């Protein structure tokens, strides 16, 4: 088991290194000036650039870059969006809204998805199943930002039920949460549908399997058998959907945060790309990779614990 | 039980009274992008005007005058208006009661420290020029801030001196008016900085400071203090109890939300959650008849720079080629339909230029003559026939065969919707006008146009919107950016005649004689038109929606002061 | 048996010269020919697919959209760049439907000065249809007025923009289907590239196994760890706007799934007897891979490709939304969506049409791939 975990962590570190290298080279290969201000004389410009080692060969810059991150945890300083501020600090300040948004989306999606999937499977081929299945297809298919625009248009403009924007200064928890309902909903619809679809398929298959019959013959009622055999067994592969779900939520939050003015990492990433704040962009890309890799790792390891068969294959 | 109900009732009543007594005058406004940092020394973003206007203290402050049609300067940190004690030396007395939001005094040392740090050659602050050389030029200030190792300048030689704890003296390079001295010291860059925090944020080699990076690393001194700042979300200001001129300000709190999406701004405006809205090209149509809509001529003439040194364009250096493009722009359509209710402009000096000197250049006789010349060519200079003629000449001049198709590259920032639409419009329109000889391709950049030009050679057209506030006093300074002495020259155009005429305008002799200055400026503008230094397109018109519940300090838009929203009162 | 008895064969039989022996019944032993045509795997799958109503509806929807994408931009009477800035933001106007009061080219203009209505320079004669509401706004009387927007903009009679026009007066219908064409092209190109790379990579890893497999699999695994958003954004920044860049960006990690699937299929089939016997007969590696093993994976691959198509369309619109799309004036569904979103409050139809189209397309591809998966499932083979 330890060897398995170490192996996974090794692969993860390798990927992070790859992300760092890729983002450094891709961003540094683009023509760019870091400081741009007509009022600054070329000499001062040179001085400013010197601070960032910009006049040394690229490979030396790469060394400084890696050294900074790995040895000092120094991702550099923002030059455009928050000039002078440490990139790491910028990310840390904004981690809370992003995490709240993403975490709540997960928190909402998993039980709702499970509920919808179970209901659809147990009431298979009834109108309830058809309604749920139809909703699943719509929610999986329509991009989250279309939903977000739609929700914003309908529920804040036509019928103002919810606040238009994220309220960072809410006087109480309820107000704060109220302003998060729409972004969370927009982000959750897709994941809910993903889980529901997966669980529905799994459950239907298990319900018709032989061991269910065995469970019934040994004297369990249908409900007991469903709960303790079918449901439990179907839950295991759900973890499979969590990885793509988290990446999906993170991708969706890039746009959603901007739409609802949530001061989180997603909006920051888009802004930093647009403003050409390259140090910040690199750090954010690493941040996003790290989050997604940690999720994968957690899921992988818990899988390894739950189901040793997977471990032997090493994920193959 | 009855007692309990009574108690509850009393409590509720008390709550109601308390809440109605708390009915604060809260002003709700917004920024389209958050201020990057609060350190006015090192950020060129105009969004910084908001927090520094409300929470910063400068030597002077512009307020509405009694006529409600204009503004005047009053001393904020300064006790009174500057006084010229000898030639080019201005004495500024400071108020003893001026202090920081925490009660610590602001005196001559604070001012000297703030200015010294702003000009510091090692810190290389981006806003240094706003102190050294804006509406007045301070002796040796620019030399000090941009000094090189082989020509050192000492701080003692700079024309900013402390006389005693509450007096400073400023020495200018030429003769200036009292108003221009005041104007210089109302700029956000000249706001005081709080020394303990500025020093605490300094790095080891004193090349940068983290002053103002977060709310905790910054100190308010103005009428309000920054209560909280959630970056990219909201800034809130509350009254500063230690402020010494509270009588000019009426709001109890100010909430500045950061709203990037126009839709969201419109929604909040419609819900009454914003007291102010500036509609964009797409939304102006909805509000064009709204009684709350106010408009004003802006300092900006939107224009397109032409690269005179594109290695891949055979016509690049030809004046005829530039003239052809000049006449090919249907400015009326672009200004009205694409920029949204703006003014077409075939000339470059903006509609506010000269207003501080008594007469707006565009309305003066020499200015009108130039406009007339342009309109003779066609509406705002648009004349496809002429454009084709000039292009033919350019082909001949550059020895390009007649059937050559030349593809111009227009570089622009895709997120700028009005320019993007203009670019798409021109991509279809130019080939039609030039019978297919000119085609247009795009190159997007996410960085600023200036930065793009520093790293790219191959481009032909690039939108620009420079505005120079000094042109309100000296109209000719619009052309400042096209001089060879300007560091980030935008278009590789250099011309001796143009520079000579600029120098004439810039001479003390002409500057002090305004009618003459207007004449010389017109000559300069004619040279600019003859050589087509760039293509002027649209004279900006600013539109604002201002809520009915605001009572403004002025009756009409005052250039350089605006509507004075910061001094407005709330009437319900 | 025969071998055991060999020693006991009569001498004369053993001495028969080889040339006298001939194969008996050379022409007589034949299997009876099938009376019916054989049903191949794909035929069978298609037959099952055809039974699935939802899948068939999806397939038809997709085909219709593809057809529209090909035909509409050619016959709409407008080109996708044809502009007329005097006629910008025209509302939808469809012949036939206009009589029913929907898509009749009218718009309620709110918040107009009452006096301006009688001003023919602002409201040309006959453009005002009805005053919806009259109210006091500040010192003036304001009205909400329903206008014939086509007349208001001076559009000649008989001109129709079915889906309205955009900020340069370009026909949305033309641009929408031109955009669909681009989006589908991006999807097709990226799916095909991913398939080719993935199949080759997966085949090599799966067929050769051992060290090569170990190396290739680990490499893919590390690459797969790169979050999809991060990779796409980086590559769009590197290559700049354009169709090719989007396809490349979608390819960087997009092929890994296909490779994994192919590799797994190879592991399943390469040990089968028929492969072993082909190998014994000296069939070369290349032929073994492509002729004998790969065809087995085609079913799952088709299903996978179908699922990847909506994914690619989605990615394109997502990239356009955050400002990393293709070059204007070329439209794509994503570009239209994002430019429509910026005027959602004023002109909701600019968002509505692309949103409906992308939703239909995504739903159809998802349903079709579901149907295909079921139809190609070998467990259901021969089922009715």
Image (cartoon, coloured by chain):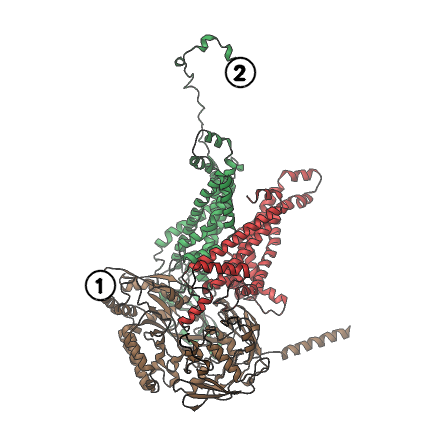
Q: How many marks?
A: 2
Name the residue located 35 percent from the left edge and 75 percent from the top edge: B485
Chain bearing mark 2? C
The relative height of residue B106 versus residue C340 in the rendered view (above or below) is: below
* Disc 1 with disc 2 on a shared chain: no
Relative depth, front residue between B462 and B18: B462
Q: In the rendered view, does B45 fall on the left or right side of B196?
A: left
Mark 1 surroundings within 10 Å by alpha-carbon count, few (fewer than 14), some (14 through 19), many (20 or more):
few
Residue B203 placement (x, y as % from top left): 52, 70
Q: In the rendered view, does B162 fall on the left or right side of B388?
A: right
- Quarter placement of the N terminus of chain B: bottom right
Chain bearing mark 1? B
SS assignment at label 2: loop
Q: Which mark is residue C1?
A: 2
Q: Tell me the brown chain.
A: B
Residue A265 placement (x, y as % from top left): 53, 62
Name the residue located 44 percent from the left edge and 42 percent from the top edge: C200
Mark 2 surroundings within 10 Å by alpha-carbon count, few (fewer than 14), some (14 through 19), many (20 or more):
few
Q: Is residue B267 visible?
A: yes
Q: Tell me the green chain.
A: C
Q: Is residue C49 visible?
A: no
Q: What's the CA distance linking mark 1 and mark 2?
A: 99 Å
The relative height of residue C40 versus residue C160 in the rendered view (above or below) is: above
Residue C139 placement (x, y as % from top left): 47, 80
Residue B550 placement (x, y as % from top left): 52, 79
The relative height of residue B569 versus residue C109 in the rendered view (above or below) is: below
Relative depth, front residue between B177 and A212: B177
Q: Tell me the red chain.
A: A
Residue hosting label 1: B399
């Amino acid at each position: 088991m330890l060897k398995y975990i170490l192996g996974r962590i090794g692969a993860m570190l390798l990927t992070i290194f790859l992300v760092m290298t890729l983002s450094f080279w891709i961003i540094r290969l683009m023509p760019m000036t870091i400081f741009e201000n007509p009022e600054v004389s070329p000499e001062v410009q040179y001085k400013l650039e010197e601070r960032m080692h910009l006049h040394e060969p690229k490979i030396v810059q790469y060394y400084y870059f890696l050294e900074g991150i790995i040895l000092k945890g120094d991702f550099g300083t923002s030059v455009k969006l928050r000039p002078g501020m440490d990139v790491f600090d910028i990310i840390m300040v904004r981690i809370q809204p992003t995490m709240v948004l993403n975490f709540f989306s997960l928190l909402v999606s998993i039980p709702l998805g499970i509920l919808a999937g179970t209901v659809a499977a147990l009431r298979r081929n009834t109108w309830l199943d058809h309604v749920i299945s139809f909703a699943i297809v719509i929610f999986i298919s329509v991009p989250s930002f279309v939903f977000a625009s739609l929700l914003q248009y309908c529920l804040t403009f036509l019928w103002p039920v919810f606040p238009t924007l994220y309220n960072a200064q809410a006087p109480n928890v309820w107000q704060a949460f109220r302003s998060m309902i729409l972004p969370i909903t927009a982000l959750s619809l897709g994941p809910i549908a993903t889980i529901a679809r997966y669980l529905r398929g799994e459950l239907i298959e298990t319900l018709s399997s032989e061991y269910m019959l065995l469970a019934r013959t040994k004297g369990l009622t249908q409900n007991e058998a469903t709960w303790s055999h079918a449901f439990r067994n179907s839950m295991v592969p759900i973890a499979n959907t969590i990885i793509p779900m988290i990446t999906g939520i993170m991708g969706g939050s890039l746009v959603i945060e901007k739409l609802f003015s949530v001061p989180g990492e997603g909006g920051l990433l888009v802004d930093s790309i647009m403003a050409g704040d390259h140090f910040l962009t690199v750090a954010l890309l690493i941040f996003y990779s790290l989050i997604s890799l940690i999720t994968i790792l957690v899921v992988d390891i818990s899988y390894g614990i739950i189901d040793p068969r997977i471990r032997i294959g090493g994920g193959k | 039980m009855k007692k309990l109900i009574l108690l509850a009732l009393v409590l509720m009543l008390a709550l109601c009274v308390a809440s109605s007594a708390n009915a604060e005058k809260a002003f709700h406004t917004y920024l389209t992008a958050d201020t990057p940092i609060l350190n006015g020394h090192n950020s060129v973003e105009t969004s910084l005007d908001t927090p520094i206007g409300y929470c910063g203290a400068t030597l002077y402050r512009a307020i509405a005058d009694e006529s409600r049609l204009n503004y005047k300067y009053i001393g904020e940190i300064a006790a009174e208006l500057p006084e010229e004690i000898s030639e080019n030396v201005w004495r500024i007395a400071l108020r003893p009661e001026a202090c920081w939001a925490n009660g610590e005094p602001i005196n001559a040392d604070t001012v000297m420290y703030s200015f010294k740090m702003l000009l510091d050659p090692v810190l290389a602050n981006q806003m240094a020029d706003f102190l050294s050389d804006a509406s007045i030029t301070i002796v040796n200030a620019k030399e000090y801030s941009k000094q090189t190792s082989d020509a050192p300048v000492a701080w003692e030689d700079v024309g900013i001196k402390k006389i005693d704890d509450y007096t400073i003296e400023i020495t200018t390079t030429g003769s200036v008016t009292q108003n221009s001295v005041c104007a210089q010291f109302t700029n956000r860059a000249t706001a005081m900085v709080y020394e303990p925090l500025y020093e605490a944020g300094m790095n080891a080699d004193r090349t940068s400071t983290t002053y103002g990076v977060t709310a905790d690393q910054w100190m308010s001194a103005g009428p309000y203090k920054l209560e909280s700042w959630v970056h990219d979300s909201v800034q809130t200001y509350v009254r500063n109890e230690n402020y010494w001129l509270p009588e000019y300000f009426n709001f109890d709190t100010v909430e500045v939300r950061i709203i990037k999406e126009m839709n969201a701004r419109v929604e909040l405006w419609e819900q009454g959650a914003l007291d102010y809205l500036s509609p964009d090209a797409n939304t102006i149509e909805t509000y064009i008849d709204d009684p709350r809509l106010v408009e004003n001529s802006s300092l900006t003439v939107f224009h397109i720079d032409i690269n005179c040194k594109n290695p891949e364009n055979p016509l690049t250096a030809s004046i005829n080629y530039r003239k052809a493009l000049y006449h090919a722009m249907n400015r009326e359509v672009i200004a009205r339909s694409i920029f949204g209710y703006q003014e077409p402009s075939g000339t470059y000096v903006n509609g506010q230029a000269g207003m501080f000197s008594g007469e707006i250049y565009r309305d003066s006789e020499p200015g009108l003559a130039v406009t007339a010349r342009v309109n003779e060519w066609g509406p705002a200079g648009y004349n496809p026939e002429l454009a084709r003629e000039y292009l033919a000449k350019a082909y001949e001049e550059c020895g390009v065969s007649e059937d050559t198709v030349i593809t111009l590259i227009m570089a622009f920032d895709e997120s700028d919707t009005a320019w993007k639409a203009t670019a798409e419009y021109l991509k279809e329109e130019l080939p039609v006008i030039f019978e297919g000889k000119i085609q247009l391709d795009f190159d997007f950049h996410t960085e600023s146009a200036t930065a793009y030009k520093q790293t790219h050679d191959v481009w032909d057209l690039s939108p620009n919107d420079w505005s120079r506030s000094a042109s309100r006093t000296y109209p000719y300074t619009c052309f400042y950016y096209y001089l060879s002495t300007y560091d980030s020259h935008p278009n590789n155009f250099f011309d001796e005649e143009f520079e000579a005429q600029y120098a004439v305008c810039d001479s003390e002799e002409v500057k002090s004689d305004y009618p003459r200055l207007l004449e010389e400026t017109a000559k300069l503008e004619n040279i600019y038109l003859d050589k087509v230094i760039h293509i002027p397109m649209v004279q900006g018109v600013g539109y604002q929606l201002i809520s009915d519940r605001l009572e403004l300090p002025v009756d009409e838009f005052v250039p350089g002061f605006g509507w004075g929203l910061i001094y407005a009162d709330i009437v319900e | 048996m025969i071998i055991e008895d060999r020693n006991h064969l009569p001498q004369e039989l053993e001495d028969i010269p080889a040339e006298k022996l001939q194969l008996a019944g050379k022409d007589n032993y034949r299997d009876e020919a099938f009376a019916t045509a054989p049903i191949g795997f794909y035929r069978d799958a298609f037959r099952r697919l055809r039974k699935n109503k939802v899948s068939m509806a999806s397939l038809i929807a997709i085909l219709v959209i593809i057809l529209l994408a090909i035909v509409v931009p050619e016959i709409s009477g407008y080109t996708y760049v044809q502009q007329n800035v005097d006629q910008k933001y025209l509302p939808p106007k469809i012949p036939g439907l206009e009589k029913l009061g929907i898509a009749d080219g009218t718009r309620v203009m709110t918040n107009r000065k009452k006096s301006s209505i009688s001003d023919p320079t602002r409201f040309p004669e006959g453009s005002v249809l009805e005053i919806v509401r009259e109210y006091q706004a500040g010192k003036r009387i304001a009205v909400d007025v329903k206008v014939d927007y086509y007349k208001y903009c001076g559009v000649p009679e008989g001109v129709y923009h079915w889906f309205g026009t955009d900020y340069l007066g370009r026909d949305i219908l033309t641009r929408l289907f031109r955009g669909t064409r681009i989006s589908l092209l991006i999807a097709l190109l990226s799916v095909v590239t991913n398939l080719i790379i993935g199949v080759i990579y997966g085949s090599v890893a799966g067929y050769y196994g051992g060290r090569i497999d170990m190396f290739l699999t680990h490499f893919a695994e590390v690459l797969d760890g790169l979050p999809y958003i991060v990779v796409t954004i980086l590559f769009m920044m590197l290559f700049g706007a354009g169709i090719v860049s989007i396809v490349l960006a979608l390819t960087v990690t997009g092929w890994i799934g296909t490779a994994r699937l192919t590799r797994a299929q190879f592991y399943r089939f390469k040990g089968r007897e028929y492969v072993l016997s082909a190998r014994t007969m000296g069939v070369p590696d290349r032929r073994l891979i492509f002729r004998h093993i790969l065809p087995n994976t085609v079913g799952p691959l088709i299903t996978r490709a179908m699922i990847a198509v909506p994914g690619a369309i989605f990615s394109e619109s997502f990239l356009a939304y955050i400002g990393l799309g293709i070059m204007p004036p070329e439209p794509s569904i994503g570009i239209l969506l994002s430019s429509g979103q910026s005027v959602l409050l004023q002109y909701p139809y600019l968002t509505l049409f692309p949103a409906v189209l992308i939703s239909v397309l995504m739903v159809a591809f998802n349903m079709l791939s579901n149907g295909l998966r079921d139809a190609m499932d070998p467990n259901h083979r021969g089922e009715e």
